[in-house]
Image (cartoon, rainbow, N blue to C red):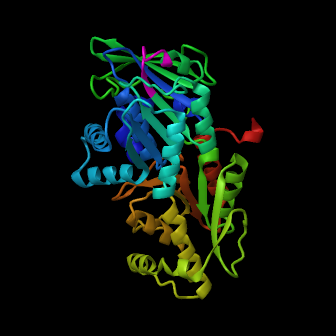
Amino acid sequence: MYEDEVMGRSAVRALGGAVRGGVEVGQLGLIIAPPGLSGSPLLRQVALAAALRGTPTLHVSLSQGAAQLRCADDELLAELGRGLRPAERARLLLEVERSRMLHGDAGGGFGPARLRAVLAALQDAAQFGAQVVVIDAQDVNLTDPDAGEPAAWTAVASAAGLRLWLAVGATQAGHAEALASGAAAVLRLSPSPSGATLTLARVAGLPPAVGLGWALSPGTQLLAEPPTTAPPLPPSPAPAQCTLYSGGATGAEATFGELAELYGLHEVNFSFEGHNQARAAGRSVLDARALAASDLSLNTVAHRLRRHWEATDTLRKILQSQWHVVANARQLFVVGSIQPDGTVHGGTGWSVELAKRWSKRVWVFDQDHEAWYAWTGAAWRREEPVIESVAFAGTGTRFLNEAGRKAISALFSASFGPVPHEG
């Protein structure tokens, strides 16, 4: 919800298709600004957009500390969230904090080797595995001999499985043009009377000098006016970066899994001893302690739904395993039936209510009305979904009909394009 609604004025959001298509895992994106103009605000938009999609994001500054970075981020988020209520702004900040790590590294000696060491330290100390890294070297003369070598940066990105963005100055020790020669995407800023103009100099897969000429507001570098053309692709992560969490049951869950396999996504299908799943790919067996972790939430949601789950031990364990499905996901996609009271029919309703309780982003395809609905926090609103997080869940009814099957397929194609083997 937040990446859609809050980042609507972001130039990076408007460039979503080009950014996704041009900077994949192991690739480098570059923001180049001339003297007197900084690319830092635009780089900040890259980091915030990724974090709001639930992508673990590391923001490195070579001239500011973590506290200064956080203040600058908070100022930009305050501008983006001016129309939000106080409670919504608080949730917005929480969404960012869940997926973002800030790191100040002054001195100018930062380079690919130092990045590799920082990534390893964060993984060891905080179990934080970054999937997007942005490095603000705008006002720093990089002295590391490999800092101007795009191949050295992309080697780190490839080994760590991440997408990498740098912001540099146009005359920065000759590094800018050297890096541009090997970058998958190059964004150039130029001064204008109203602030700055953004040009998409190159994106992999698109012709050179694509242009744009978008006017950006001074300071924030948000769009001064909405773009006249829509981006060619949605701002979804690359399929190989994504994990589908599900239960592998007959019907909707098995169909989600089949599509995930076709597109090359990682699967985790939670189960328990003695449970036969329709889909065994990525099977993760939960022990008694893991299953019991869900009991408090299970009882709370059962009260909300006015339903009781003690009918059978197997049914209770299935619902307990669904707790892990929802807990691991940032987005939840469900196929089922929305009832007059706003809950969803059957055991699937437990997953939906849990997602609401945890402020997860949740969509339901109502098979009776053959339409997708998003939960706004107060009501269901008709809305076509797109997969925007690297961690999402797919679940729903065992009695999947043709409309439901087509809806799941359309979700994947809207997010990732045609099925790979279909060209």
Q: Is residue 103 above or below residue 274?
A: above
Q: Residue at x 44, y 34 (%)?
A: 135
Residue 25 in view of the camera: no
Q: Position of residue 270 (x, y in %)?
A: 62, 69
Viewport quadrant of the C terminus: top right
Say if 111 sits above or below 317 in the image. Answer: above
Question: Residue 272 versus residue 362: which sits nearer the camera?
Answer: 272
Q: Which residue appears at 46% of the width and 45% of the height?
A: 57
- Give the percent coordinates (x, y) of residue 69: 31, 40
Task: Identify the residue at image location x=39%, y=41%.
Answer: 48
Which residue extends farthest top? 193
In front of the other: 261 or 43: 43
Q: Between residues 246 and 117, which one lies in front from this camera angle?
A: 117
Q: Which segment did they paint magenta?
A: 167-175
Residue 223 visible in the picture: yes
Residue at coordinates 48% horizontally, 45% vertically from top-left? 118
- In the displayed orientation, state which residue is furthest to the right: 421
Residue 187: x and y in percent read 47, 21
Q: Position of residue 108 (x, y in %)?
A: 40, 29
Magenta stretch: includes residue 173: yes
